Every structure is written in structure tokens, then in C-alpha cells.
Amino acid sequence: KAKSEGKNKFVMFTQEMNDKLLNRIRIEHSIRIGLERREFSVFYQPKINLKNEQPTSFEALIRWKRNGQTLGPEKFIPIAEEAGLIDDMSLYVLDEVCLFLCRLQENAISTLPISINMSPRTFNNPDIVTTIDNILAIHAVDHRLIEFEITETTAMKDVRHTLSTMQDFRQRGIRFSIDDFGTGYSSLSYLSEMPVSTLKIDKRFIAADNANSRSIVSIITAMSKQMQLKVVAEGVETRDQLQWLRDLDCDEVQGFYFCRPMPDLATESYLQTGSGSSPAEGRSAQV
Ligand code: C2E
Ligand code: MG
Ligand code: MG
Ligand code: MG
């Protein structure tokens, strides 16, 4: 098609592709180096129980400190996935989380679990259960302190394989949440067979904050109760959102209203003082 539009266009098109490709290769290379140099860090955001407003667990969210700025995962996870670097990245996060869990335990700060976002590729790796067993064994971390968040797409991709992997993990004590629930295509019949503990309602339904989105949240919450699953709302930013989620009897919330994702040290003081980062501090710490 480009060729039929004339020679110059064709040249420009390939030049642009070439630039994009080079840029990709550069980023891939710096991800690889960044993992070796441990330039990535993990931030933590609490999930808050709505009954007592206390944290029940934290979600691990990866960040990249690069040339003085902090990059969020949407800037590099897709590239890491395409470049086959996501397994290394996932294990890096697990390793960091284990180190942090050990520190919290040794200093008697907390024994709350931490959830990790699992990329479909890593989750479908045939050696995943053994690999994760080994990492937990090295750090002497109890499986019950780890949760995995997988999306509907990951869960429904290869149902038989997913089910058996989930069962292997669940037998060891690892729990599962379905992340971004309501945005994918879940078979409710398969979902009910899976050892899932929690549904996390996608933040877009909280952000929309209209009659439609509220009825979707209401339906997901009611369904969770029926299926005896815990239900967590993501992306809660306002008091008003909190109020209608309370009215719907949502179990837990996560969002800027209570606390932004924080670096490990800030998470420790949050746990010790029981207060989150102030909005100003949080805004600069969060990316
Ligand atoms: P997610 O798992 O659905 O995480 C929730 C995202 O919402 C996080 O963005 C979090 O910082 C953000 N968030 C939390 N509270 C609020 C709020 O009140 N308002 C708004 N607008 N946003 C809020 P983040 O950290 O940029 O992560 C984006 C996505 O990247 C995650 O979505 C997850 O899918 C992926 N991700 C993050 N860390 C990892 C990781 O270690 N491994 C993998 N494979 N994926 C990761
Ligand atoms: Mg998540
Ligand atoms: Mg989510
Ligand atoms: Mg998301």
C-alpha cells in the first residue's frame, strides 16, 4: 500500500518503522541492563477493609527509576512482554516482595499478605510453580503471604492449564484475585470452578460514577457475595465513591482516597504510624 503511494512516501514509512524498531531495541536493552543493575523498585498500595478502615494486604506495583525520573509499568511492561523479558521482571518483583516481607516480619511490623500482578506469559510458563516454590524457599517466605492478581483474559486463556496451575498454587497457600474484573470476558461457569478468593472491580467502573457503572458494581458485588468471594473496588478517589461502595456492601477498597502506592520505606512507616502518605507527598512519590 505504501509503495503505491509513491517512492518518497515508501522511504519515509520505512524510515519511521526503522526509528521505531531502533527505539524498541534501545528500550529492550535498557530494561535488560536495568534489571541487572536493579533500577526497578516496587511500590505498595494498601487494600482497606471498609468495616474498620484497616489495611488487609498490599498490592506490589513496579516502578522504574531511570535518569532521575520514575516510570510507571504501562511504559515498559508491554515492551518487556514482547521482548521475552517479562519472566525475569516477574521474578524480580517476587524477589523484592519476599525481601520486603522478611523485613516486615523480622522487625515485627506486619504479617499482612502482598499481592503480585501476574503477566499471562509468566503464569503460563510450565515451570512457574517450581520456580516460585524455589524463590519462596530461598527467602523462607510462607506461601500464605503471597497472592496473585490475574486478569480475566489470563484466567480464561487456557482454562484447563490455568485451573491446574491455580490449584497447585492454592494447595500451597497462595490466593488469587481476578484483576480488572468486568472489563474482560469471563465464563462464570469456569470462574466458579477456579480457586479464586477475590474479585477486584476495575477502576473504570468506579471512575465513571454514573447510574450505569453503579449498577454494574452493584451486580458484581451481589454476585461476589453469592459466590462467597471477597470484592475489592479499585481506584477509589473520593468520599462520595466510598459512600456508595459502602452502601453496596463492598468488602474492601483501594485507591488514592486512602493511600497512593508508596515506596517500601514509606510503607513501613505507614504500617507503624497507621497513616498514609499525605496527598502532597503521595502525589510526588506515586507515578
Ligand atoms: P492494576 O493491577 O489494575 O493496578 C491498579 C493501577 O491503578 C495501578 O497503576 C495503581 O497505581 C493505580 N491506582 C491505584 N489507586 C488509584 C486511584 O485512586 N486512581 C487511579 N486513577 N489509579 C489508581 P500502575 O501502578 O501504573 O499499574 C498499572 C498496571 O500495570 C497494573 O494495573 C498492572 O496491570 C500492571 N503492573 C503493575 N505492576 C506490575 C508488575 O509488577 N508486574 C506485572 N506483570 N504487571 C504490573
Ligand atoms: Mg492489580
Ligand atoms: Mg486492576
Ligand atoms: Mg488495570
Image (cartoon, rainbow, N blue to C red):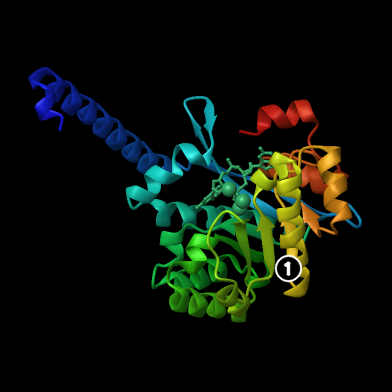
Q: Is residue 117 visible?
A: yes
| The quadrant where residue 26 appears | top left
* Secondary structure of the residue carrying numbered label 1: helix
Q: Quadrant of the C terminus?
A: top right
| The quadrant where residue 230 appears | bottom right
Estimate the x, y position of residue 39 in percent, counting from the top left.
Answer: 48, 39
Q: Is residue 261 above or below residue 227?
A: above
Q: Looking at mark 1, is its residue's CB closer than 8 Å to ligand 3?
A: no
Estimate the x, y position of residue 216 in percent, counting from the top left.
Answer: 71, 54
Q: Quadrant of the N terminus?
A: top left
Q: Which residue is mark 1?
A: 223
**Which one is in front, 189 or 47?**
189
- Numbered circles on residues, count: 1
Residue pictured at 42% horizontal, 67% vertical: 124
| The quadrant where residue 199 appears | bottom right
Q: Is residue 46 above or below residue 222?
A: above
**Which one is in front, 211 or 204?**
211
Residue pictured at 81% horizontal, 58% vertical: 250
Estimate the x, y position of residue 188 in percent, counting from the top left.
Answer: 60, 72
Residue at far right of view: 52
Estimate the x, y position of residue 2 in percent, counting from the top left.
Answer: 15, 29
Q: Is residue 101 above or below residue 23?
A: below
Residue pictured at 65% horizontal, 34% vertical: 286
- The amino acid marked with disc number 1 is Met
Residue pictured at 16% horizontal, 28% vertical: 14
Q: Is residue 172 visible?
A: no
